[in-house]
Amino acid sequence: MKLIKVFFLSILGTVLVSVIACSSGTSQPTPTSTPTSTKTTTAPPTASESKIAFASNRDGDYEIYVMNADGSNQTQLTSNPAVDRNPAWSPDGNKIVFVSNRDSDEEIYIMDSDGVNQIRLTSSHGWDRDPAFSPDGSKILFCSFRNGCGEIYVMDADGRNQTRLTFNTGGSPDLDTEPAWSPDGSKIAFTSTRDGDREIYVMDADGSNQTRLTFTAGIDESPVWSPDGSKIAFISWRSGSYDIYIMNSDGSNQTRLAETPGEDRTPAWSPDGNRITFASYRENNYDIYLIDANGENMRWITNSTGIELSPLWSPDDTKILYLFGPEDNSDIYIMNSDGSNQTPLTYNPYMDADPVWWP
């Protein structure tokens, strides 16, 4: 087995995307048409009306950029000799929170969506990472190492009232990471090593009622809420390889979506909750796949010699954003949700990473 690791920085991306290259001779599904959406709610903005924030080292170090959803009007928002990564939009699109080491430690900053009024929100002796606005935009969730181990904190959107939500015994083995708001903002799912290996937990938004959801000898990590908050998708090593699983939000009915001797990563729910896209190493390369949320109708929707990772749905269900390229030169691509019309939005000999849609 050959081991390749692609680190798009943990949110400092590191968006830490671990690439394990395994040989696989399994047959693959051929691309098929995408099922008709059953969404009946008010239509969100179309993909063409959306914006994309991302990080790029095209000027020599990582800075935050924003562009239209067709790749036009690429605009640099930050400019300093440090590393700026992991942009996240406020729900109203007026603010962007991000991580920067411009003042030595990795700290969380906020700015207007046009790049003005860049303000430091955290100031600690350990790193602060993984910022995420609450669904109502009033709070920012983040991870911090300020107390000697990775813990989850929350603060007001202006940086006030920084509150520790999780409490571990200390030391690098104890980590609470990957916090994710439930769609209604009442719960937070996260990954923790507090009981030995990486498992999925959930807690109330104020840190109370911390409950372990997964109990396996393998790794369970990267929780992602379904749009209606009733289910959580996650990655598990319990079967001897990384596979995508789904469970109810209370931890019941844990079900593997698809089996592979390779590696499945970065699950993302469609806005209607009917499908999940993910990156998978199945044919000596990472490609993007699509599967119905009930585990049926898996489609292989990209097939190239490059590495394709981190798929993200557009707000209107019609497009999928993803990273494409070799380890040291990724670009941001977009395609229709059935895999057709694969188009580069960025194209340069550097690293473009951490793309996020607004809204």
Image: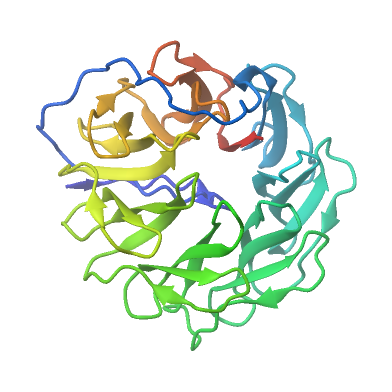
Q: Nearer the viewer, residue 245 or 249?
A: 249
Q: Is residue 232 above or below residue 65?
A: below
Expressed as whole percent of the image width and height from the top left, the position of residue 74 reads 72, 23
The structure residue drawn at horizontal position 66% and vertical position 42%, both measured from the top left corner, is: 62
Residue occupying the far bottom of the picture = 169
Residue 21 in view here: no
Residue 116 located left or right of residue 108 = right
Residue 29 located left or right of residue 32 = left
The structure residue drawn at horizontal position 41% and vertical position 30%, both measured from the top left corner, is: 326
The C terminus sits in image quarter:
top right
> Residue 58 falls in which quadrant of the image?
top right
Q: Is residue 137 above or below residue 273?
A: below
> Residue 50 falls in which quadrant of the image?
top right
Q: Is residue 319 above or below residue 222?
A: above
Expressed as whole percent of the image width and height from the top left, the position of residue 265 reads 35, 45
The structure residue drawn at horizontal position 24% and vertical position 58%, both measured from the top left corner, is: 237
> Residue 295 falls in which quadrant of the image?
top left
